[in-house]
Amino acid sequence: MAFDTRRMMRHIQEVEISILGDVFGHMRTDEPAVQHSFTFETNELEHTRFDMQKPATILPKQAHFVSLVVDRQGNTFISADKMYTAKMNYSLRNILPNDSVVHAIIFQVHNSPRPILGLFDATCVAGQSLLKYSCIQRHTILHKAFRGSTAYPHIRMHWVGHEGVLVHDLQYKRVSVDFHIDCAVRLPDSLSGDIKYARLTPKEPLTVMVPKLNTEKMMRVMQTKRAKLNP
């Protein structure tokens, strides 16, 4: 997994930046919180009916979390373990407004040698701090600002929604994606310096497929109930 991560990062990283002030000095926002520490909780969390509205996303296998800065000139910088300039193919100049700090997952899709950069959250967009907003609200604002292009099919928005919907669809194999799924992940509602993502396990065991309705049996049951109601 470590090798795959290094290989994916080499696709997007260019030159290491040693002085963060050189990056932040070219931004108008006063909250360029990009030096986040992305970690997973040690224990998996069990999804229950009380967690339906919590924010969640799909974690692809061998995925890696990164943050990206777009300064006021449109230059893109990537923050993972260190800060780097982004390679031209992963520049967000024509995809997001300047003065933005966004968070993404980098992962591999089927039949493509180029990793995908899936944007799912943001600290600020166009110089506007989003720290006062909830996770779903931040994702909505980011989605509205995102200008996807056929020239950059490897940069996309990554799905974020309510935990109940995602876990239910994963249980019944109703999720259709072009990558191998690791698990559902609960997202933090607010951003901080140390962001923790928790892997989710559904309370009920995974179902291979949605059971087909037996129409004939259902009709017999309904007829029996009608007969009891109308003797």
Image (cartoon, rainbow, N blue to C red):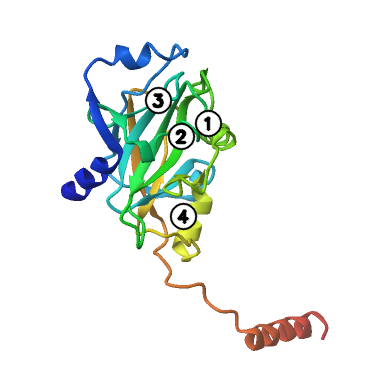
Residue pictured at 24% horizontal, 15% vertical: 19
**Considering only order in the chain, which callout, 3 or 4, is on the residue closer to the N terminus?**
3
In the image, residue 195 lies at what x, y percent?
34, 30
Q: Nearer the viewer, residue 217 or 141?
A: 141
In which quadrant will I find the C terminus?
bottom right
Contact flag, marks 4 and 1 (Cβ < 8 Å): no
Q: What residue type is labelled 2?
A: Asp
Q: Mark 3 points at which residue?
A: 75
**Considering only order in the chain, which callout, 1 or 4, is on the residue closer to the N terminus?**
1
In the image, residue 23 lies at what x, y percent?
34, 17
In the image, residue 135 lies at what x, y percent?
50, 33
Nearest to viewer (mark 2 / mark 4): 2
Q: In this view, does 147 lie to the left or right of 113?
A: right
Q: In this view, does 153 lie to the left or right of 105?
A: right
Point out which mark residue 121 bears.
Answer: 2
Q: Can residue 187 be seen in this view?
A: yes
Nearest to viewer (mark 4 / mark 1): 1
Q: In this view, does 6 lie to the left or right of 103?
A: left
Task: Give the residue furthest to the right.
Answer: 230
Cα distance in 3D space between marks 3 and 1: 22 Å
Cα distance in 3D space between marks 4 and 1: 21 Å
Point out which mark residue 166 bears.
Answer: none
Q: Mark 4 points at which residue?
A: 167
Q: Which amino acid does label 4 sit on?
A: Val
Q: Mark 1 points at which residue?
A: 138
Q: Is residue 209 above or below residue 162?
A: below
Label 2: which secondary element: strand
Nearest to viewer (mark 4 / mark 3): 3
